[in-house]
């Protein structure tokens, strides 16, 4: 399975999102978790989402179209980037508004460094779906991805996974570098988005 993707728009203002009928799948995670690299691996394109050695370059909600009925949405990272308090607050409001108020949103792909496991910020993001209006229907699906799995030694895998399962989470182990889990993630996205 392959995604053919194109950049559509970048939004830095609450509510200024594209108007379309596409099902949206959002990618969220810390600034240094490898979101852009993973997005590029998903669509098999090195340059679709810009990667940087400096975490936190994504400061807007970026929309990428996949065919006629699906979109990937790259949310700004959190927790590591060097930025002022006002900018961090603005990004927090933008992300919360998108996750709680965006009706076409069908799934949240939460990226967590496989070496660290989920912490308070990730768990707080997962709980945001409870704030979505009831008339949107069923809650959005959640897919947790353990990124940078290539950096976890084979003997450390069980320990790494226990950091997730302790919270009742079964992650997809993924690596943008060696491709582990990428195809499984593509199939899961298509299944939960109904695309």
Image: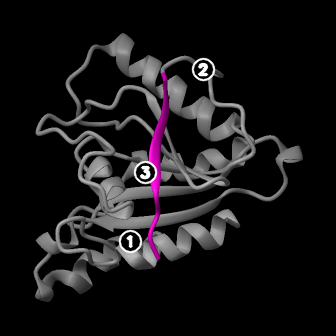
Furthest-right residue in this view: 135
N-terminal label among 3 and 1: 3
| Position of residue 100 measured from the top left corner of the image (x, y, whole percent) | 67, 38
Q: Which mark is residue 122?
A: 3
Q: Distance between the residues labelled 2 and 3?
A: 21 Å
Residue 16 higher or lower than 103, as above or below: above
Q: Which mark is residue 164?
A: 1
- Label 2 Cα neighbours within 10 Å, binned few <14 / some 14-19 / many ≥20: some
**Residue at the image position 73 percent from the left and 57 percent from the top:** 139
**Residue at the image position 89 percent from the left and 45 percent from the top:** 135
Give the quarter of the image for residue 99. Answer: top right
- Label 3 Cα neighbours within 10 Å, binned few <14 / some 14-19 / many ≥20: some
Give the magenta-colored segment's residue range: 1-11
Q: Name the residue under label 2.
A: 14
N-terminal label among 2 and 1: 2
N-terminal label among 2 and 3: 2
The answer, for residue 168, to whether it is visible in the render is no
Q: Is residue 190 left or right of residue 36?
A: right
Q: What element carries label 2?
A: loop
Q: Distance between the residues labelled 2 and 1?
A: 32 Å
Residue 7 higher or lower than 16, as above or below: below
| Position of residue 110 measured from the top left corner of the image (x, y, whole percent) | 45, 56
Give the quarter of the image for residue 173. Answer: bottom left
Q: Is mark 3 on a helix, strand or loop?
A: helix
Residue 8 lies in the magenta-colored region: yes
| Position of residue 160 measured from the top left corner of the image (x, y, whole percent) | 25, 75
Q: In which quadrant will I find the C terminus? A: bottom right
Residue 88 higher or lower than 40, as above or below: above
Q: How many marks?
A: 3
Residue 85 higher or lower than 103, as above or below: above
Residue 141 lies in the magenta-colored region: no
């Amino acid at each position: 399975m392959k995604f053919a993707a194109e950049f559509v728009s970048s939004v830095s203002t609450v509510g200024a999102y594209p108007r379309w009928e596409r099902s949206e799948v959002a990618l969220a995670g810390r600034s240094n978790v490898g979101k852009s690299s993973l997005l590029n691996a998903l669509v098999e394109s090195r340059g679709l989402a810009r990667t940087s050695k400096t975490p936190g370059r994504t400061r807007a909600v970026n929309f990428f179209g996949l065919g006629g009925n699906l979109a990937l949405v790259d949310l700004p990272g959190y927790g590591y980037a060097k930025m002022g308090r006002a900018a961090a607050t603005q990004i927090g409001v933008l992300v919360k508004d998108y996750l709680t108020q965006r009706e076409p949103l069908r799934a949240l792909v939460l990226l967590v460094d496989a070496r660290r496991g989920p912490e308070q910020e990730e768990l707080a993001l997962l709980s945001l779906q409870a704030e979505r209006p009831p008339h949107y229907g069923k809650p959005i699906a959640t897919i947790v991805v353990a990124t940078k799995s290539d950096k976890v030694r084979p003997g450390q895998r069980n320990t790494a996974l226990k950091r997730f399962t302790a919270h009742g989470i079964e992650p997809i182990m993924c690596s943008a570098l060696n491709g582990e889990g990428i195809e499984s993630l593509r199939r899961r996205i298509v299944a939960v988005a109904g695309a």
